[in-house]
């Protein structure tokens, strides 16, 4: 990938506000589809603003999850709607590579049963955050979706199957069986809605118990509402792990994660009705987890300096598949 010229990046952003300046530009960790930077925007006669820049990877076509301006469009739609909090888009630039600027929302991003941090929230705060996320999901799904083709869940299932076909069968053993079992019992479709694609607490920012923003919209789509719901439910008892050991404070924080039943109740309170076939989607989310992690594990094994967290994740993958099969078997 070509190097990104930071000075040029600053100049491009400054064009949107004559006399402005970006300082302290630094790369943020995470993200595989675009480059993310934090900075401070200084504008004449305005208070300084902490901002985030999302930049398409230079040298690659800005399509699909690399289409950062598509991300900006959904953030603008949600900001105008007001149903769920998101960062405010301040500027978009379609030069090469495309980028947009949004406000940096303060808050903590933390997955209670997977992450390790020096200052984890209390169990009661975790409970409140998870219930807030469930209610926000129901509100999000009431937002009129953009005019894009809804992706059938069978198409998504086949997409993950193609991804798994690219990895060594030993990485996620028996994934073919789970695929066949899922493919034989795809539920009837329901009305499509806006889908985040990775809806969980780690992709939200909280200040205390308050949901400050839903972030990371790289893979949003129009699809089945049960996919995001089941993804959130799966993280009440995630089948995978990234750390062999988590300290007492982080384990204690995770104990505050509500049950699936409690999250479903909070979701239904806002949605107003039940969705059939959620258990199938829960099994499907285990298959999706196996597919995405398998690719990371494959790349990690080829690396001269493998990441310990992905070595640990690899050890959990056989259990991810078996958990998915068990959940599906119990839905008969």
Image (cartoon, rainbow, N blue to C red):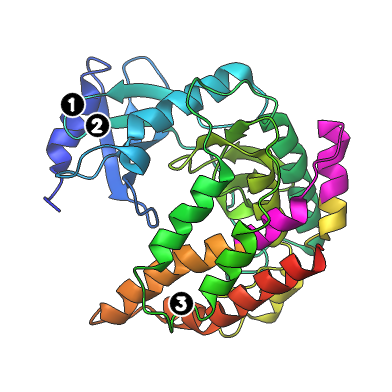
Which is more toward the observer, 10 or 144? 144
* Residue at disc 1, secondary structure: loop
Q: Position of residue 86 (x, y in %)?
A: 56, 32
Residue 49 in view in this figure: no
Q: Position of residue 263 (x, y in %)?
A: 81, 51
Which region shows up in magenta? 264-285
81 versus 272 height, above or below: above
In 3D space, how far apart are the residues under numbered discs 2 and 3 (Cα atoms)?
Answer: 32 Å
248 versus 53 height, above or below: below
Q: Is residue 275 magenta?
A: yes
192 versus 180 height, above or below: above
Residue wearing tag 2: 98
Instruction: Check whether the beta carbons of the residues at disc 1 and disc 3 lie within 8 A of each other.
Output: no
* Residue at disc 3, secondary structure: helix
Q: Position of residue 261 (x, y in %)?
A: 87, 55
Instruction: Check whether the beta carbons of the residues at disc 2 and disc 1 lie within 8 A of each other.
Output: yes
Residue depicted at 34% across the width and 34% down the height: 68
15 versus 110 height, above or below: above
Residue wearing tag 1: 95
Q: Residues within 10 Å of mark 3 (few under 14, many from 20)?
A: some
Residue 166 in view in this figure: yes
- Quadrant position of residue 295: bottom left
Left/right placement of residue 84 relative to residue 287 reads right
First in sequence, mark 2 or 3: give its number: 2
């Amino acid at each position: 990938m070509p190097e990104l010229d930071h000075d040029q990046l600053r100049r491009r952003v400054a064009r949107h506000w004559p006399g402005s300046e970006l300082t302290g530009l630094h790369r943020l960790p995470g993200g595989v589809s675009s480059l993310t930077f934090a900075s401070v925007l200084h504008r004449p006669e305005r208070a300084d603003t902490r901002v985030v820049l999302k930049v398409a990877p230079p040298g690659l076509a800005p399509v699909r999850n690399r289409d950062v301006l598509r991300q900006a469009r959904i953030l603008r739609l949600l900001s105008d709607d007001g149903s769920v909090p998101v960062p405010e888009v301040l500027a978009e630039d379609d030069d090469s590579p495309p980028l947009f600027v949004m406000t940096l929302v303060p808050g903590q991003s933390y997955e209670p049963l997977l992450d390790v941090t020096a200052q984890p929230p209390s169990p009661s705060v975790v409970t409140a955050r998870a219930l807030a996320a469930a209610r926000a999901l129901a509100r999000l799904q009431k937002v009129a979706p953009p005019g894009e083709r809804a992706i059938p869940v069978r198409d998504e299932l086949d997409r993950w199957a193609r991804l798994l076909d690219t990895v060594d069968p030993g990485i996620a053993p028996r994934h073919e069986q789970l695929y066949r079992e899922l493919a034989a019992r795809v539920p009837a479709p329901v009305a499509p809605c806006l889908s985040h694609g990775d809806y969980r607490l780690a992709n939200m920012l909280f200040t205390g118990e308050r949901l400050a923003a839903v972030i990371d919209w790289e893979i949003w789509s129009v699809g089945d509402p049960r996919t995001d719901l089941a993804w959130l439910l799966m993280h009440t008892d995630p089948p995978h792990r990234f750390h062999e050991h988590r300290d007492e404070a982080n384990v204690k924080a995770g104990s505050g994660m509500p049950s699936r039943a409690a999250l479903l109740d909070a979701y239904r309170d806002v949605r107003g009705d039940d969705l059939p076939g959620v258990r199938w989607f829960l099994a499907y989310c285990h298959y999706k987890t196996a597919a995405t992690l398998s690719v990371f594990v494959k790349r990690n094994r080829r690396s001269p300096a493998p990441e310990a967290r992905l070595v640990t994740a690899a050890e959990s993958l056989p259990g991810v598949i078996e958990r998915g099969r068990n959940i599906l078997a119990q839905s008969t």
